[in-house]
Structures are given as C-alpha cells and as structure tokens.
Amino acid sequence: MQSLGINIGSTSLKMVLFDAEKPEKNSGLVWSATVPHEGDFGAATRKLLIDGNVPLGTPTLVTGNEGRFMFDAAGTLEPLCVEAALKALGLSADAVVSMGGEDLVVYKLDKTGKIINNFSGNKCASGTGEFLKQQLARMDMKLEDIDKVPDPAKVYPLSSRC
C-alpha cells in the first residue's frame, strides 16, 4: 500500500511517495521531489502531485510549520517523522541534522533511535539551510553533492557574527 508524506517548510515543499509492500526498491521509496513554494502552497502541492502521479485517495501525512493545517490530512511533528524514518530504513545514528530555510536543529538520538535531546540554532542561525544551498549553488553543487566532497577538503571561516 502506498502512502504520501508532505513536508511544508519555510521555503520549500517536499513530498515522498512510499510503498511499504515494495521494500526491495530503495526501501520502499517510489518517488520524491522538492520545489520552492514561494508562499503558494496550493500550486506547489498540485505540481508535485501531478509530477509524482500520486493516486487519488493515497493516505497522507503532513509535517512542517508553514501551512500543514491548510490540508485535510493528518499532521505530525518533524521529530516523530525522524524517528520513524530511521526505524523504517533500518538506520542507526548518534544525531540527525535538520536544516531548513529558517532554522537548524540537531536531534541527539539514543541507541534505539529515539530523540533524547535537540539543539536549535538561535535567531542568528535563521536561514542556515537556505544559506548553505546558496553557497553550494555558487560552487555548481546541489545538497546531494555534499557526500562527494573529498576528505582533504579545506574549511574556510565565513564570518564570526550573524
């Protein structure tokens, strides 16, 4: 059975279509996409639903602060989704970093994958995720390319203030 996850962030709308009965295909991942919503949640949602060929009536869960209540669908908090995703994918981690257009959150996990603490950036960290995307674009990179940065890469300080 397929299910749809929607995350509405401050700058982007993300969707993932998942099929729990097809774990052999990328752990059940059928399709995923991200688009900037520019404040028009409806248009961004319609675009992704059409692009992903999401079947009408697909069970859906919505997360994100920016408009999740605009949908007639079940909503939940991001930390619960982080825990569930790690469990479903069989992944183990000490921490998960969530960077959005306006925030940065680090979730500290215990050995069972439960969040035991979180650390949020202060107001000066607002825009951290969007800033990172902009800097990557200047280097002709996408977020997915971060894993390909060689180990001997140098880190340069950008600023010591907000």
Image (spheres, grey):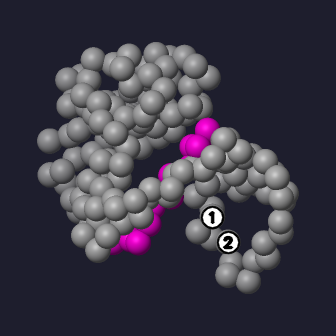
Q: Residue at x 26, y 23 (%)?
A: 73
Label 2 sits on a secondary structure element that is loop
User: Which numbered dot is residue 59?
Assistant: none
68 lies above or below 95: above
The residues colored magenta run 91-103
For the question of whether residue 50 can be seen, the reply is no
For the question of whether residue 60 can be seen, the reply is yes
Q: x and y percent of residue 34 in the render?
A: 51, 38
Q: Is 122 one of the magenta-colored residues?
A: no
Q: Is 100 one of the magenta-colored residues?
A: yes
Q: x and y percent of residue 41 in the render?
A: 49, 20
Horizontal side, residue 77 vs residue 147: left or right = left
In the picture of the structure, the residue carrying the numbered disc 2 is 149
Query: How many angstroms separate mark 2 from mark 1 (CA)?
Result: 6 Å
Q: Quadrant of residue 55?
A: top left
Local crowd at mark 1 within 10 Å, few (<14), some, or many (≥20)?
Answer: few
Label 1 sits on a secondary structure element that is helix
Residue type at mark 2 is Val
Local crowd at mark 2 within 10 Å, few (<14), some, or many (≥20)?
Answer: few
Horizontal side, residue 14 vs residue 85: left or right = right
Q: x and y percent of residue 15 in the render?
A: 40, 37
Is the N terminus in the top left, top right, bottom left or bottom right quadrant? Answer: top left
Q: Residue at x 56, y 25 (%)?
A: 37
Whether the residues at callouts 2 and 1 have beta carbons within 8 Å, the answer is yes
96 lies above or below 70: below
Residue type at mark 1 is Ile
Magenta residues, dominant SS class: loop
24 lies above or below 49: below
User: Which numbered dot is residue 146?
Assistant: 1
Horizontal side, residue 73 vs residue 131: left or right = left
Q: Residue at x 54, y 51 (%)?
A: 120
